[in-house]
Amino acid sequence: MADHARTAPVTDRDAGSRELEPLLREVVGRRLRALRLARGERLVETAARAGISPQYLSEIERGLKEPSSEMIAAITGALATTLVDLTTDVARDLRGGLRAQEQRHPRTTETPTRSDEPAVLAAPPSAPPFALYAVAA
C-alpha cells in the first residue's frame, strides 16, 4: 500500500486549534500491537504466523502502513482473534477518543432562530411531482 500523508477534514472555523482525529490505520495499529503484547509475543513470531515480514507488521502497528482487509484478517488470525472483534474494539477506541476530544474542546454553536417568513421549496421544472431538491429560506 502507498504511504499517505496525515490529513483530516476541516469541519469548522476553529478547527486549526483542535487536535486531529486519529487515522483509522493508527488506531488499528495500536490495537494490533496491544493484542500481540497481551499474548507476550514478539513481532517475529506474529509476523511469521501471519505470513508477512516483521518490518511490515511493525509499520502497521505504528500506523505507517495502511494494510488491506485481507492482511488485517491474516494478522488477527495469527493473534487468535477475529476481524469482527478487532473492528469492534477499534470502533470503541475511536468513539472514546472523540468523546474525550469533545470534552477538551466543546463545540460552540449558535442557536437556530425561527423565521416568520415561510420556507420556499424549489424543484426544477422537469422534476417529477413531489420531488424535493432544495430548501431555500
Image: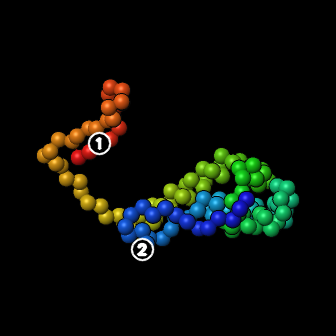
Tag in front: 2 or 1: 1
Placement of 102 over or under 50, stated as above or below: below
Q: Secondary structure at mark 2?
A: helix
Q: Can you say which quadrant of the picture contains the N terminus?
A: bottom right
Colour scheme of the picture: rainbow
Q: Which residue is mark 1?
A: 135
Q: Where on the picture, by quarter, is residue 89?
A: bottom right
Looking at the image, the residue that sits furthest to the bottom is 17
x%, y% of residue 2?
71, 62
x%, y% of residue 55?
80, 68
Kind of residue sitting beneath label 1: Val
Looking at the image, the residue that sits furthest to the front is 125
Cα separation between marks 2 and 1 = 33 Å
In depth, the one of 59 and 86 nearer the eye is 59
Q: Earlier in the sequence, mark 2 or mark 1?
A: 2
| Residue at point 86%, 59% (across, down) | 48
Judged left or right of residue 22, residue 108 is left
x%, y% of residue 62?
69, 68
- 2 and 1 marks in contact (CB < 8 Å): no
| Residue at point 55%, 66% (across, down) | 7
Kind of residue sitting beneath label 2: Ser
| Residue at point 18%, 49% (across, down) | 114
Q: Which residue is mark 2?
A: 17
Q: Secondary structure at mark 1?
A: strand
